[in-house]
Amino acid sequence: MTKRPTVLAVCLLIAVVVAAVPGAAQQARIELRRDGASVSFAAGGRPVARLAPFAEKDFAAEDAVREIGPGLYEWTRTFRYLGQDHVRPVRLAMEVEALYASRYSLIPAVMYDGNAWGRGGEPKGFIKDGQPWTFAYHRTSIPGATYSESEAWSVGLFSAPGQIPGGFSCSLEPLADKTVHRLIWPEEETPQVYAMRDAYQPAYRGDLRVSRGQEIALKAWIVVGAVASPRHGWHALVDAAWALNARPAKPRLEPEELWEMGVQYALDSLWAEEKGFRGFSIGLTWDPQEQGWVQRQVWKYEIGWAGQNVSLANSMLRDYVLSNERRSLDRGIQCLDTWLKNARLPNGLFRCHYDYVIGLEDPKGEVQDACNLGQAAQGYFEAFDLAARCGLRKPEYRAAALAVCDFAVKAMRADGRIGKTWKNNGQAVDPDGTTGAFLIPPLVTAFRATHKAAYLEAAERAFAFYFGEFGRNGFSTAGALDTYCIDKESASPLLRAGLELHDVTGKAQYLKAAEDVSYYLATWQWHYTVPFEEGTVLRQLGYDTYGGTAVSTQHHHQDPYALSLVNDWLKLAQLTGRPVWKERAVAAWANGTIGVSGGDLVVMGKKRPYGSQDEGFLHTRWLQPFAVSQWLVAWPTAFRLETLRQNPNWTVFNKN
């Protein structure tokens, strides 16, 4: 609201989350303390955090805090410019000082405990060359969020866009005796901009000017809650951010439309036949010579991950059940049989990239990975059932899936670690990361299919290892196969495995684990809408970041990967009775329907094929900021079809 022409008042959502770990500290109630102009938070009579005063020449700042609900406070800070200059450029800051040295720190979707894990060139640590990294709010899944925790307490800070022209930024500064959470206006990214994978550009600094007598009021919310376990205290942060920003999410297309568009895109644009291969291309790229979209000519055919051949084939079988379309059945079976007959290895592995089978890639570096293998095994279990519904008996499909599971059991160490990659002879290449968890869901399915206790025992042992590692680290790793870093994809099989193990064992610990993993996945999901400027590609496309997810700490852009979480979150909502997971699922589905071409969609001057969708939505300063990647990859289509294929209740996906 504007009090007078020279006054700017801004209502800004900022939340500070102060939370306790289990034990005696959990029993202590957070107290709000005021001592003159000083505002702090204490527990058990000891200070935990305080609002740092704003000290800037010719400025006065006043803080007001009031409790508006159990553990919820409203904080308003009002800046007043008292200088004589008519117009002056300024750098305003709001800071919360956590009164401890942080043991675990987080900037959601950007930095997890300093990003020390992995070999990438993404920002490492919260300080560079003596300066705190500052990141634009739109780079973070919760706007401008920072989080830290000690042995006993945690503090988080976040904001919301659209309040002061030009946006804002955040930084986290770990010091010896305190941790500073900072919000900054105007927007800046310093000391450099992380602009593409392992690459940087010069710092960005916005320009905010104030006039004589001007006021700027920032409104904040403070949330107090308990932390379930060390390195996971941010559960309260994401709950608060979602509750403050949640709104109905509307898919752009009806599920029946998306099914038909996906099937047609797979059959008409992705189908490929080459040197005996019958299956689906990994995706389309723009050919400037042809002035059109063509199937990518390198790294063409993949059984899972980005190529999703088995999942697409299964959707073709399901389409035959729904529509009696013979072409769908024929191509689905051809694809499944092609991989089965020519890419299987005697030890149970699949050659996950068919390019090696037909001599398109140098075999010296060929390895098979747990992500592709897990998706292949789960897919062939499903293919066995779908083929039967199509009137076909295909016992070899189940046998192939069981063979992958048998390999996983043999490869598993005594502690439950399965590993990430293997050579064709089964020799382990990389045991690290969370990627091995992709083999846990098919192990549970193998137990369902055979009732052999060895499969369930292996699944539980592997889950204990990977979930335990996740718990100790506060993040998961290496599931995004084009990077080697902290990411979200590697956590998705832990969510699925937790739900499946809960289903077959009835043990409550697995349901709790699935929810714990979901909280981590929630740190990658956008809790708000980034307001893109006029003239940007994402503004023209009508892209809404709400519900979407970023890729990894090494790749800062959104993609529709959360489509793969939708059914799991719907199930989690039902089992826990907590509607927030259904809300997140619907938001993820709605986000994943944006930009699916009806055949006449033109983006960046290029008309897109019917049913296609981009992989990368560049929601921040990345590659070409606020544009798209122009990579019409197979997996978003596959994930939409898979979500619909495995959920008979399509009403949850309706537009209205």
Image (cartoon, rainbow, N blue to C red):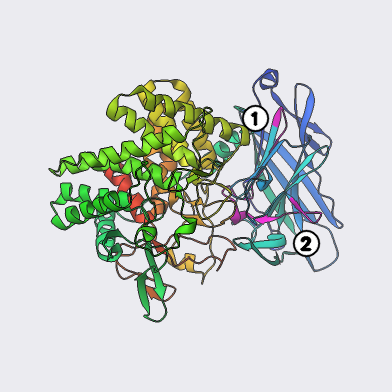
Q: In the image, 118: left or right of 181?
A: left
Callout 1 secondary element = loop
Observer-nearest residue: 232 or 186? 232
Q: Which residue is mark 1?
A: 230
Q: Position of residue 264 (x, y in %)?
A: 25, 61
Residue matched to label 2: 90
Which corner quadrant of the image does residue 216 belong to?
bottom right
Q: Is residue 11 visible?
A: yes
Label 1: few (<14), some or many (≥20) within 10 Å?
Answer: many
Picture layout, residue 110 above or below residue 414: below
Does the image show residue 233? no
Residue nearest the observer in this picture, 512 or 215: 512
Kindly identify the residue that appears in the image at 35 percent across and 46 percent down: 345
Question: Distance between the Cα atoms at labels 2 and 1?
Answer: 38 Å
Residue 27 at x, y = what percent?
A: 67, 18
For the record, the magenta segment spans 127-153
User: Is residue 613 rendered to the left or right of residue 312?
Assistant: right
Looking at the rendered structure, the secondary structure element under dot 2 is loop
In this rendering, the count of numbered labels is 2
Q: Residue at x 62, y 29 (%)?
A: 225
- In the rendered image, the vertical position of residue 579 relative to residue 505, given as above or below: below
Q: Is residue 209 left or right of residue 167?
A: right
- The type of residue carrying mark 1 is Pro
Instruction: Confirm whether the magenta stretch covers residue 149.
Output: yes
